[in-house]
Amino acid sequence: MMNYWEEHPAAFKNRYRKRSNAESTNSAFKRKFGDILNSRKWNMQKIETGIKVVIYNIRLLIRYRIRTESEQRWSYWTKPLLAIAFYISLTIFFIWC
């Protein structure tokens, strides 16, 4: 790894930036949902993880929309969007089961 850094510094920085982004995303995901899965079977663990990822992504989209738009315009829609995200995650869970 050190040889690669010394020989190709630009490529190393690009690759390390991607790793840093992946590590920070995994860290945020685990802080939000915990690092333990409640399911015992492998198939259900995959489903549980998929649902958590969908919820996490929807949460990020909602937060992005709230931050980019004016507070007054989106404060009215915040609760309904969170409810929609919850129902979408439940629908996906029951479809995958």
Image (cartoon, rainbow, N blue to C red):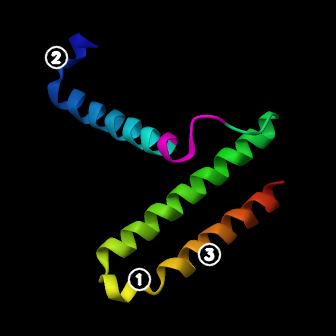
Could you tell me residue 96's position as x and y percent? 79, 55
Judging by the rendered image, the residue that carries numbered circle 3 is 84
* Residue 49 shown left or right of residue 81 in the figure: right
First reached walking from the N terminus: tag 3 or tag 2 = 2
Q: Secondary structure at mark 1?
A: helix
Could you tell me residue 6's position as x and y percent? 15, 15
Vertically, is 9 above or below 33? above
Q: Which amino acid lies under the numbered mark 3 shown in the image of this protein? A: Ile
**Measuring 56% from the left and 46% from the top, which residue is drawn there?**
33
Q: Crowding at label 2, few (<14), some or many (≥20) Cα neighbours within 10 Å?
A: few
Q: Secondary structure at mark 3?
A: helix
**Measuring 18% from the left and 22% from the top, which residue is drawn there?**
8
* Residue 22 shown left or right of residue 10 in the figure: right
Which region is colored magenta?
30-36
Judging by the rendered image, the residue that carries numbered circle 2 is 7
Marks 1,2: beta carbons within 8 A: no
Q: Nearer the viewer, mark 1 or mark 2?
A: 1
Gap between marks 3 and 1, in whole Å? 15 Å
Gap between marks 3 and 2, in whole Å? 50 Å
Could you tell me residue 79's position as x and y percent? 53, 78
Q: Which quarter of the figure is the C terminus placed in?
A: bottom right
First reached walking from the N terminus: tag 3 or tag 1 = 1
Q: Crowding at label 1, few (<14), some or many (≥20) Cα neighbours within 10 Å?
A: few
Judging by the rendered image, the residue that carries numbered circle 1 is 75
Q: Which amino acid lies under the numbered mark 1 shown in the image of this protein? A: Ser
Instruction: Tell me if residue 43 is in the magenta stretch.
Output: no
Q: Nearer the viewer, mark 3 or mark 2?
A: 3
Gap between marks 1 and 2, in whole Å? 51 Å
Residue 6 vs residue 61, the one in the foreground: 61
* Residue 47 shown left or right of residue 82 in the figure: right
**Measuring 32% from the left and 82% from the top, which residue is drawn there?**
71
